[in-house]
Image: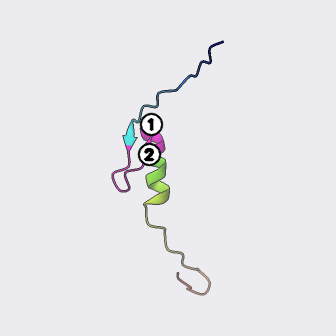
Amino acid sequence: MEIFSRKKEVIIDSICPKCKMEFLDSERMLRHIAKAHKPKKKFECDTCGFRN
């Protein structure tokens, strides 16, 4: 009896220029950049003027 194993070949399409993380497609890489590398917007309260 033979045992067969199927190994899937993963093709890396895009690499993040900031952290070198690898992605299967450019859409996932762009989503990663938007969430992980863009600065968060500062919050300012209209009522009291509080800022973070």
Placement of 26 over or under 49, stated as above or below: above
Q: Is residue 3 magenta?
A: no
Magenta-colored stretch includes residue 18 = yes
Q: Provide residue 37's location: percent of width, then percent of height.
A: 43, 60
Determine the residue located farthest toward the top in the rendered image. Answer: 1
Which residue, given by chain and number where applicable, does mark 2 sit on? Answer: 29
Q: Please report the residue visible at 38 percent of the width from the left and 49 percent of the height from the top.
A: 16
Could you tell me which residue is drawn at 48 percent across and 67 percent down?
Answer: 40
- Pick the residue in front: 17 or 5: 5
Residue at 52% from the left image edge and 26% from the top image edge:
8
**Hey, what amino acid is under mark 1?**
Asp
Circle 1 packing at 10 Å, graded few (<14), some (14-19), many (20+), is: few
Q: Is residue 46 left or right of residue 26?
A: right
- Looking at the image, do the residues carrying marks 2 and 1 touch, with CB atoms under 8 Å apart? yes
Instruction: Give the spatial CA distance, label 2 vs label 1.
Output: 7 Å
**Towards the viewer: 38 or 24:** 24
Question: Which residue was labeled with disc 1?
Answer: 25
Q: Residue furthest left?
A: 17
Q: Residues within 10 Å of mark 2 (few under 14, many from 20)?
A: some
Pick whichever, 47 or 51, lies toward us: 51
The magenta span reads: 15-28
